[in-house]
Amino acid sequence: MEKKETLDSSLKDIVSICKRRGFVYPGSEIYGGLSNTFDYGPYGAELLHNLKRLWWKHFVHLREDVVGLDSSILLNPKVWEASGHVSNFNDPLIDCRNCKARIRADKFLEDQKGEGAATGLSLQEMNRVIQEGNFPCPTCGNRGTFTEARDFNLMFKTSHGASAEDAQDIYLRPETAQGIFINFKNVVSTTRRKIPFGIAQIGKSFRNEIMARQFVFRTREFEQMEMEYFCEPGTQKEWFAHWVEYCLRFLTEQVGLKKENLKIREHEKEELSFYSEATSDIEYKYGFGWGELWGIASRTNYDLSQHEKFSGEDLKYQDQAANKKYVPYVVEPALGLNRLFLATVTDAYAEETLADGEVRTVLRFSPKIAPVKVGVFPLMKKDGLPELSRSIFGELSALGNMEYDDGGAIGKRYRRQDEIGTPYCVTVDYESLSDKTVTVRERDSMSQERLPIAGLKSFFADKIL
Ligand code: GAP
């Protein structure tokens, strides 16, 4: 079979297949939408769950030194004062006086002058460069219409309490990490964990991004998979190197992303977050170019020390064996689930021209994360084939999400499963009734083999689990 491949999938292709095949829908669509919000359809929801399960397995279950947590989205507002988010979690904002467009000043400067053009610049310095450049507004094209750059806090404010008198201003969490720090003492005292150890959590975070864009890459509501790894001061460099390597291997060996689409970028001193002494980003080559996928930061003892100061609680760790007491240092691998979703779909997307000239679109997900594991097809909707197919479907369903499809020509059913990334299809035909075998078709090679029904479950279990 001759196959010609288009290697680079543009963001347009990805958005299109996600909508067409029920992975991602625009949010609130029947009401005209709500900008930058997305709903995940049946296959998207399965893919998200599979990615979360895989991460949890490798960052919690397979690690004897990591435990899980599920903290609140709503936290006492003092948490965000202590963490520095109230005063420091800002992006520089400029407005166009003519068309009222709101623009993130640092990203605007990078668009105008190249990557890194805004790194380390103060608000005043950005103002100067923008004025000197006399750049046109990207929305209306007018020049000289920008306001001065000012800090814009990214946290979403909301009100906590039923009556106006009791209501307290609080924030939706902008990261899951702080829920972990404020439970450090609880976890140590209830689970008898010894340092070094980590606490992992998956959950939604919210940021009022000035320029939310690039599909699900930068949204105001998103999900994070974060782990805070607590270690003895002086050992953080070793752990930092360990986690960078571990995360990269997770992406290539477990999720199955191609090595050439991943790279590590170390942060320059001037671009480090206010809490970090070192940060490396694992970047992915998305349809629009390289962008951050996973941030791994050495957060020092900044957060625990701040929470000690603001809460008055002793958050030091008592090392019984060494008879020492200290505030642990922290290494944090912080991954965005929606960005991992986008990277996974982008990486899996391929268009192939087959020998007969037909173009086949296929999502080559690893079987471990594919939204549908096996498509089960009766050749005809009669003569006992549906009954046998349903019993196979029932047995295989114990392994994961299967799909039963009895509509249309078999070739069309295969193409549909190719487009949602199903790695295997099982066709039940008349021979199956007598010899108890079925045709198993593999997505990537499109090869077919005849296998006994009795061995199907263990055949697929090896590949899917
Ligand atoms: N606790 C550290 C922290 O939150 P971050 O680099 O700001 O660090 C971690 O975020 C990850 O969360 C990023 O690498 C990215 O994958 C994801 N992320 C951050 N902001 C996002 C947004 N607006 N939309 C989608 N994902 C986002």
Image (cartoon, rainbow, N blue to C red):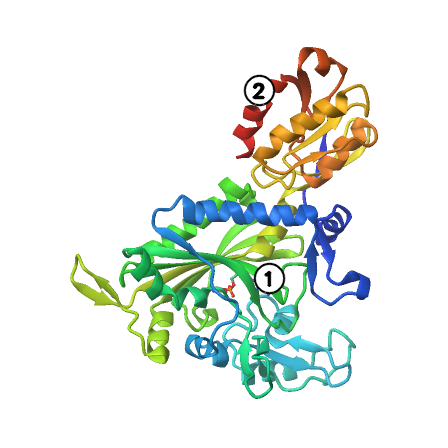
- Please state if 104 lies on the left or on the right of 61 as rendered: right
Nearer to us in this view, 288 or 219 = 219
| Quarter, ligand 1 | bottom right
At mark 2, the secondary structure is helix
Q: Residue furthest bottom?
A: 165
Question: What SS does tag 1 mark?
Answer: strand
Give the side of residue 192 with respect to residue 200, left or right.
left
- In the rendered image, residue 307, in percent from the top left (x then y), is placed at 37, 74
The image shows residue 167, relative to residue 227, as above or below, that is below
Residue reaching furthest to the right: 408
Q: Mark 2 or mark 1: which is in front?
A: 2
Give the left or right position of residue 97, taking residue 364 as reference. right
Q: Is residue 102 or residue 337 the one in the foreground?
A: 337
Q: Position of residue 324 (x, y in %)?
A: 18, 64
Q: Are marks 2 and 1 in contact (CB under 8 Å)?
A: no
Residue 445 is at least partly visible in this image: no
Residue at the spot 33% in from the left edge and 65% down from the top edge? 185
Q: Name the kind of residue labelled 2 in the image.
A: Gly
Q: Residues within 10 Å of mark 1 (few under 14, many from 20)?
A: many
Q: Residue at x 72, y 30 (%)?
A: 3
Residue in the picture at 57% in, 71% down:
117
Residue 222: give its label.
1
Label annotation for residue 101 = none
**CA separation in Å, label 2 and label 1:** 41 Å
Q: Tell me which residue sits at (17%, 56%) in the image.
A: 321
For badge 1, the amino acid type reads Phe
Look at mark 2 in the image and give the residue it sits on: 455
Quarter occupied by residue 94: bottom right
Q: Position of residue 417 (x, y in %)?
A: 72, 35
> Mark 1 CB in 8 Å range of ligand 1?
yes
